[in-house]
Amino acid sequence: MIVLGVLASGNGSNLQAIIDNIKSGKLDAKLGCIISDNPDAFALKRAKESGVPAYYINPGSHKTYLETERELEYMKCLQEHKVELICLAGFMRILHSDFLRTFKDRIINIHPALLPSFPGLHAQRQAFEYGAKITGATVHFIDEGVDTGPIIIQRAVEVDDNDTAEKLAQRILKVEHQIYSEAIQLFAEGRLKKTGRKVEITNSD
C-alpha cells in the first residue's frame, strides 16, 4: 500500500475520486495528508470529512509559486506523513527545483487536455475555442516546466458539435477521475518505468 500526499487549491473533485477509489478497494493506497494553499479550498473539507489529515499552509505573497520558506513547510509536512507519491489535484502553484529534487519522480499531475496541446490554465476552454475535434486528459510526471513532464496515461474525449466549454469540461472531468487513480495504482505496483521523456507501463508480476 502506497502513502499519498495530495496538493489541492480548490474544489478537489479529483481528490474525492481518489478517496472513493481507496474506499472501494480499486486503489491500493492510503492518504497520508492533504495540503492546500487556499484556506477556503473545498478539498480541505473533503479530506476532513474522510478523516484525512488536512492542512492549509500559507504559500506566501507570490501568486504563481511557493515562497522558499513556505515550500520547506510543505516538504516537511509531506515527509512527516511519510508520503511516497505526491498527487497534484488542481494545485495552482509551480514547484521549485529543490522540491522536485527531494521528491524526484514521485510527483504527478492531472491535466484536462491531451498534452502537449493546451497546457496551462483553462485547457478545456482552450480546446473548445480552438475548434479541436478531440481533446481529453493527461496524467504526467512533474518537471520544472508547466505541464511539460513525461506522460503516463492519456485518454481522449471527442468534442461534440453541440458542446459548450462547460459541457466539455464536465465530460473531461469524468475521464480525469478514472485515469488519475489508474496511474496511481500503476505507480503503487511499480509498473512505471521512466526513461527520459518516455514512460513505459510494464507487465505486472
Image (cartoon, rainbow, N blue to C red):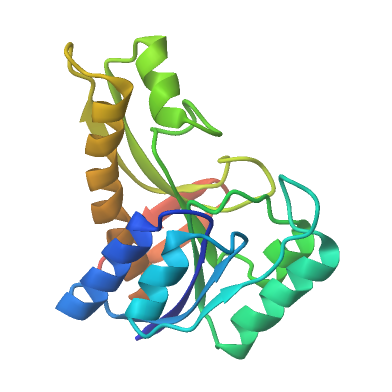
- The residue shown at (18%, 17%) is 160
**Residue 75, position as x, y percentages in the image:** 69, 75
**Residue 172, position as x, y percentages in the image:** 28, 38
**Residue 128, position as x, y percentages in the image:** 35, 17
In this view of the protein, can residue 157 be seen by the observer? Answer: yes
Query: Which image quarter holds the N terminus?
Result: bottom left
- Left or right position of 35 against 126: right
- Left or right position of 96 against 143: right
In this view of the protein, can residue 190 be seen by the observer? Answer: no
Query: Which image quarter holds the C terminus?
Result: bottom left
Foreground pick, 14 / 104:
14
- Number of numbered discs overlaid on the protein picture: 0
- The residue shown at (70%, 82%) is 76
- The residue shown at (33%, 75%) is 189
Image vertical order of residue 189 relative to residue 92, above or below? below
**Residue 120, position as x, y percentages in the image:** 56, 34
